[in-house]
Amino acid sequence: ELELMLAPLGVELVQPHEIGGTPDVVEDQPTFAGNAVTKAVSAARAAGLVALADDSGLEVEALDGAPGVRSARFAGEPCDDERNNDKLLSDLASVPPERRGARFMCALALADPNGEVLLEVQGEARGRILPERRGTRDFGYDPLFLFTEEGHAETGKSFAELSDEAKARVSHRGRAVRRLAAEIPRLLPELT
């Protein structure tokens, strides 16, 4: 997704495995943006390159924003999508549909090798949590997340029912990446 959107701008993306990896980072910040910044700064310093990092997850209104930054490990360690979905359904078992509002959030951070944060952007997608899984595509909470924003062909479908292209048009990550791509031309002198 990033490569497709950034290719016309002449930005070359280097994957962590191409440079021998990046350090593991403890994701202990209370926000997606904080975790994205921590990861971007760590990777940029270690690689000596400008680094882009992502942190994303699901926030459910009836659960006071949980699973939030703990989305990947909502049901405990190790990360397990099926267990996370089962826990979410269990936690919401007595919650009526009108109180199952949720949003997916994505924070992207770009940092330089000195650890300076060059850019932070966020994207979100609003919906609600279904009472059971729908669809077979993608991963994580996608089978339980019903996209409800009006005015889109994708409205009324779970993220797991959407093609990759359709999901990218309305997803939290797709929206964050488009914001990032819009800012890259302004940052190009700093990135070279």
Image (tube, rainbow, N blue to C red):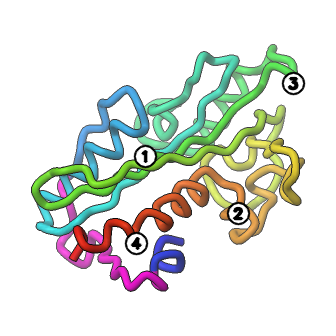
Which amino acid type is marked by label 1? Asp
> Residue 56: image x %, image y %?
49, 45
Q: What is the CA distance from the residue labelled 3 to the residue labelled 4?
A: 43 Å
- Which quarter of the figure is the C terminus placed in? bottom left
Return the residue at label 3. Answer: 97
On screen, residue 155 above or below 58: below
Which amino acid type is marked by label 4? Pro
Q: Report crowding for label 3: few under 14, some 14 to 19, many 20 or more residues within 10 A (C-alpha).
A: few
Q: Residue at x 72, y 39 (%)?
A: 126
Q: In this view, does 70 lie to the left or right of 112?
A: right
Q: In this view, does 130 lie to the left or right of 65?
A: right
Return the residue at label 2. Answer: 169
Whether tag 3 and tag 4 are in contact, CB under 8 A, the answer is: no
Mark with earlier residue (3, 4): 3
Mark with earlier residue (3, 2): 3
Q: Nearer the viewer, residue 13 or 186?
A: 186
The quarter holding residue 1 reads bottom right
Whether tag 3 and tag 1 are in contact, CB under 8 A, the answer is: no
Which amino acid type is marked by label 2? Arg
Which amino acid type is marked by label 3? Pro
Q: What is the CA distance from the residue labelled 3 to the residue labelled 1?
A: 27 Å
Return the residue at label 4. Answer: 185
Q: Is residue 163 left or right of residue 46?
A: right
Range shown magenta: 7-23
